[in-house]
Image (cartoon, rainbow, N blue to C red):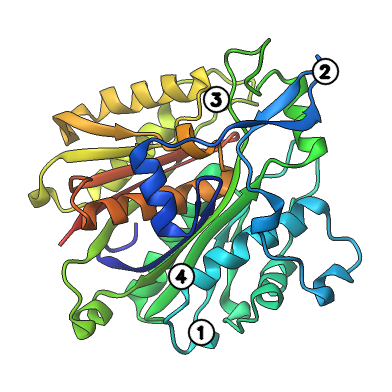
Amino acid sequence: MAEKGTIISGIGMMTAVGIGAKQTAASVRAGISRFSETSICDKHFDPFVMSILPDEVLPPVKPEIDQIVGLTARQLRMLRLAAPALEEVLADTRDIEKIPIYLGVPEPLQDRPKVVDDEFIKYLGMQTGFRFNVGESELFPLGRASGLAAIQKAMQVLSSGDHQHVIVGGVDTYLDLYLLGTLDMENRILGNFVMDGFIPGEGAGFLLLSSPDVAEKSGENPVVQIQAVGVGYESGHLYSEEIYQGNGLSEAFQAAFDSSDTSLGNIRSVFAGLNGENFGAKEWGVAYLRSKSYFEEEFRLEHPIDCFGDTGAALGPLMTGLSAIGMKKNYIESPCLIWCSSDYGTRAALTMALF
């Protein structure tokens, strides 16, 4: 487990309810949602309801990327989603070429190839014009929990002293015909004939994480500090034949709590990766009951997927950024817990506080 003390120095977002972190946070705080019918129909010939950005607000793909053979429509849209959020988080950052990126990306479907490969980080640099440290950057193809797993790696790197800054992010979109068709056949997308389902969304979230001494030199006060990240594995996940026992998310909670500063008190706010499917609600209930002593009797529960849909691999960085903004503006109480569960086995939880 990484040492605690990582500082959030910058936040960038791109979601269906906000172009940028401030607009997204304000929309989520106000409970604004953006769900609408699309031109894509399900197996019952009903239009899918999704939470997606208007095409005109996304930057065009750079010509040099557009000429690359083999890039899928989903990969190109992910680049268009990620670029503005990455530009926002790096707006005032120097020596970008020294900073690595740890990027959460979608899980591959069962028996299907990876959604993106390691070249995606290079393409992201081409799309934004930033020359960051591609050689030390890394992809985390773990779905919803990928961004928090990437934060865990970033904390380890920062605590080792190898870097003073690390960029962590996540990007994903469900606007893909094969993916929508697969989920539709599995009855997982909310619709007229599916009540136990979710609203597909898309988005990108990026965080600039810094070592504590950087914040001290800058004189910034107060600061949002990530205490700890816990990662677990659920063997009885959605696509497993094993019996669900609720161990994965419980393990992630416990690992995060074990490395957090208990003097800050119990958890007062939770940003939950609940997307509307019963499986996730059951999993949260089990993990909470097993760790109930770490929570205040009355705590605030936020599930922003209600506003911008299921953003997949972008969810962890988005919720971490939203909670950081909320704590600094005093409408989210500290300390806070963020958790995400992937479709397959990965589970992750993060604790953070305001200092």
For marks 3 and 4, give the one nearer the viewer. Answer: 4
Query: For the residue labelled by badge 1, is the local secondary structure a helix, a strand or a loop?
Result: helix
Sequence-first tag of 4 and 2: 2
In-image side of 210 versus 198 (left or right): left
Q: Is there CB contact under 8 Å for labels 2 and 3? A: no
Badge 2: how crowded within 10 Å, few (<14), some, or many (20+)?
A: few
Query: For the residue labelled by badge 3, is the local secondary structure a helix, a strand or a loop?
Result: loop
Q: Is there CB contact under 8 Å for labels 1 and 4? A: no
Sequence-first tag of 3 and 4: 4
Query: For the residue labelled by badge 2, is the local secondary structure a helix, a strand or a loop?
Result: loop
Residue 255 image position (x, y, % from top left): 31, 45
- Give the residue drawn at x 11%, y 50%: 264
Sequence-first tag of 1 and 4: 4
Three-letter code for the amino acid on which mark 2 is drawn = Phe
Question: Marks 1 and 4, how far apart in space?
Answer: 11 Å
- Provide the residue designation for mark 3: 236
Question: Marks 1 and 3, how far apart in space?
Answer: 41 Å
- Provide the residue designation for mark 4: 89
Residue 191 image position (x, y, % from top left): 65, 17
For marks 4 and 2, give the one nearer the viewer. Answer: 2
Residue extending farthest to the left is 263
- Provide the residue designation for mark 2: 45
